[in-house]
Amino acid sequence: MATFEVNAGTSKSPGEVFGFLADMTNATGWDPSIIGVARTEDGPLEVGSGFTVTLGFLGAEKVLTYRITEFEAPERLVLRSESSFLVSEDTVEVKANNEGGSTVRYHASLSGKGLVVLVEPFLQAVLSYFGKGAKPGLLNFLSK
């Protein structure tokens, strides 16, 4: 399984951080690999809410559908996309700190299914590439 993680502190409240990261439409502002994101339905964000995410990689576009599988505002969120070849899961954990801000753990994992398991080292390289681009944008949001 390929993984990527960012741990950071911020002066933002847990609610502000959680709300921003739970709404994947905000990802285009901090993750340069994401070309576009659209909600798949209206209404409040909750378990089952979905997003269509268009990724750009090596000149190609890949569309993934993510669903919220865990939603424990403002502390824990899990977003998951599963295809016949891949499982992508992003876990966000937010904890209040003593200064009125929060600490954030953003953990992404990517794993292959079937024969794709044989190329897991390639998946780590891909996720590291995406993470290298996304980390500065995420840290920038948290530092404002």
Image: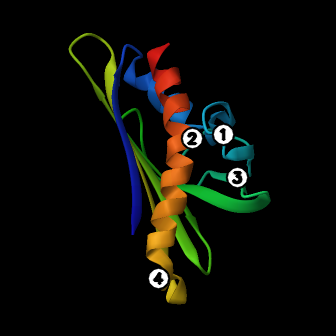
The residue pinned by badge 3 equals 53
Q: Amino acid at mark 1?
A: Pro
Most extreme residue toward the bottom is 115
Q: Are marks 4 and 3 in contact (CB under 8 Å)?
A: no
User: Which residue is drawn at the image coordinates 40% and 58% (left, top)?
Assistant: 3
The residue pinned by badge 1 equals 32
Q: Are marks 1 and 2 in contact (CB under 8 Å)?
A: yes
Q: Are marks 2 and 4 in contact (CB under 8 Å)?
A: no
**CA distance separating discs 3 and 1:** 12 Å
Q: Amino acid at mark 4?
A: Val
Closer to the N terminus: mark 3 or mark 1? 1
Closer to the N terminus: mark 2 or mark 3? 3
Q: Mark 3: few, some, or many residues within 10 Å (few <14, many ≥20)?
A: many
The residue pinned by badge 4 equals 117
Who is closer to the viewer here, 40 or 10?
10
Q: Mark 1: few, some, or many residues within 10 Å (few <14, many ≥20)?
A: some
- Secondary structure at badge 1 equals loop
The residue pinned by badge 2 equals 133
